[in-house]
Image (spheres, grey):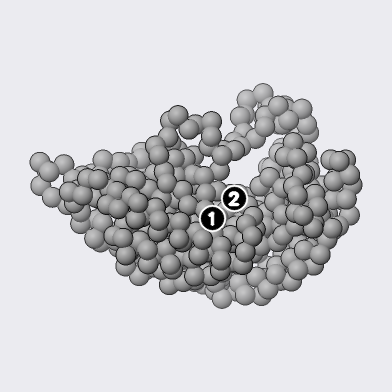
């Protein structure tokens, strides 16, 4: 660990451009530089320890520097780090694909690798589009998505996204997507069931008005992550599956954020026994170790890409590091830890603890709403609890609250004025309890001062 803290920070500000970061603010303020990880803690260059409250952007699963995953990567380094899957096979990618199909929703049969959540979605939409083209149904070219959805930052995945703050600047580059309202009661009047039905009716209307033109519907199952941890009402996902089947369109499930135990099950689709036609995975796939993504498809979809060379049914899409052996080795080790440490079985008391603490937090003055699905939780800060009026976005309330948690040794990252809790699935109960206490204490004692400044 280096002692040259000033040198590191100065070099960061000189050379590094950070993602989703207002760089003028970054350059003006003091910042934390992470140098090391131990278990569920991040350690900066000044040797301060912080609980990793958002799993290093929702991808860490078993903690940092996990002996079994470290060993798997080291062992793979002694064999081979990478070889292409274009025209060649690779042992680790085969082993991982077999494991993924065994645990994925029943009916998925093939694994197409890439290296990020956005690319897994990009592959899914191109796969869905070409599936219908290969079958001779050439009018099916449109996609249906939900408002406030987020599916990544490539041009295709941005076209399917519905968050104007992120995506409006790129609108001239995007293809048209048909959007239905999100099925959540947080910003609409009505019960969860009424909001669910409103969204479903809108989706079915789009399917009817564009009969024979829809290639696929894409959803984030159970929870819209980047929208602010928007939890969908019960039955919504299953009903979307039924609509997709009824109108003969494909269903794409984007489980980049929700996969690998985040919602209390290995995959969010399991909550309603849904098998999508295409499933997108990334983030927790390698337990946060290395970039790797996977797009899983049914045998029926795969078969549509088979044929004589002259029919040009080949899926002309690929990435240099597709099926990277090091990343696959980390993913295999992670899946083995899921089973060995009974991660899924360990989740109920953690989920219950979060639920209990959220109930206490929801009573605080400036908290408009708390929502939770498994280990994914969002705490919405509002200006007025009764009217649920929001603070001016320029006040950066969420960011200031998260910054106030740093001296208490916790690192979180907000989505606007929604404080996001995303502990690693393997986090132990005592550490999780400390993290939740820090969040509660900050919202109770620091938030009133922060909101007073904003007024």
Q: Nearer the viewer, residue 36 or 246?
A: 246
- Looking at the rendered image, the quarter that the C terminus falls into is top right
- Looking at the rendered image, the quarter that the N terminus falls into is top right
Taking 89 as reference, is 156 above or below it? above
Q: Is residue 352 visible?
A: yes
| Res 278 → quadrant | bottom left
Residue 227, numbered circle: 2
Say what secondary structure mark 2 lies in.
Answer: loop
Q: Nearer the viewer, residue 102 or 62?
A: 102
Task: Say few, some or many: other residues with alpha carbon within 10 Å of mark 2 (under 14 / 14 to 19 / 20 or more).
Answer: some
Pointer 1 residue: 182
- In the image, residue 7 lies at what x, y percent? 73, 28
Residue at image x 70%, y 67%? 354
Total labels drawn: 2
Residue at image x 27%, y 52%? 212
User: Cβ–Cβ below 8 Å for labels 1 and 2?
Assistant: yes
């Amino acid at each position: 660990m280096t002692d040259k803290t000033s040198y590191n920070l100065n070099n960061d500000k000189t050379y590094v451009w950070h993602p989703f970061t207002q760089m003028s603010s970054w350059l003006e303020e003091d910042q934390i530089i992470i140098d090391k990880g131990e278990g569920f803690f991040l350690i900066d260059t000044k040797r301060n320890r912080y609980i990793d409250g958002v799993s290093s952007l929702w991808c860490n699963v078993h903690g940092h520097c996990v002996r079994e995953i470290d060993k798997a990567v080291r062992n793979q380094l002694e064999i081979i780090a990478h070889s292409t899957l274009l025209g060649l096979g690779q042992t680790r990618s085969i082993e991982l694909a077999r494991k993924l199909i065994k645990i994925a929703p029943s009916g998925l049969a093939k694994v197409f690798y890439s290296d990020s959540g956005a690319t897994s979605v990009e592959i899914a939409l191109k796969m869905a589009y070409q599936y219908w083209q290969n079958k001779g149904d050439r009018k099916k070219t449109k996609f249906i998505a939900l408002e406030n959805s987020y599916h990544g930052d490539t041009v295709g995945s941005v076209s399917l996204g519905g968050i104007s703050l992120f995506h409006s600047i790129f609108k001239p580059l995007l293809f048209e997507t048909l959007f239905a309202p999100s099925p959540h009661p947080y910003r609409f009047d009505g019960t969860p069931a009424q909001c669910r039905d409103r969204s479903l009716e809108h989706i079915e209307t789009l399917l009817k008005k564009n009969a024979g033109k829809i290639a696929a519907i894409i959803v984030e199952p159970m929870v819209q992550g980047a929208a602010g941890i928007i939890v969908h009402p019960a039955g919504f996902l299953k009903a979307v599956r039924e609509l997709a089947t009824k109108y003969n369109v494909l269903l794409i499930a984007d489980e980049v954020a929700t996969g690998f135990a985040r919602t209390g099950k290995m995959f969010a689709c399991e909550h309603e026994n849904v098998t999508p036609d295409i499933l997108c995975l990334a983030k927790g796939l390698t337990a946060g170790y290395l970039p790797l993504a996977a797009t899983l498809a049914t045998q029926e979809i795969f078969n549509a890409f088979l044929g004589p060379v002259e029919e040009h049914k080949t899926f002309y899409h690929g990435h240099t590091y597709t099926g990277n052996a090091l990343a696959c080795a980390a993913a295999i080790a992670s899946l083995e830890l899921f089973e060995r440490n009974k991660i899924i079985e360990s989740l109920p008391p953690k989920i219950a603890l979060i639920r209990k603490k959220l109930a206490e937090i929801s009573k605080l003055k400036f908290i408009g709403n708390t929502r939770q699905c498994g280990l994914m939780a969002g705490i919405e800060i509002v200006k007025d609890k009764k009217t649920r009026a929001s603070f001016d976005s320029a006040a950066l309330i969420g960011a200031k609250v998260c910054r106030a948690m740093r001296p208490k040794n916790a690192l979180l990252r907000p989505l606007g004025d929604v404080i996001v809790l995303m502990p690693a699935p393997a986090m132990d109960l005592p550490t999780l309890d400390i993290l939740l206490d820090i969040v509660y204490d900050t919202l109770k004692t620091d938030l009133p001062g922060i909101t007073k400044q904003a007024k």
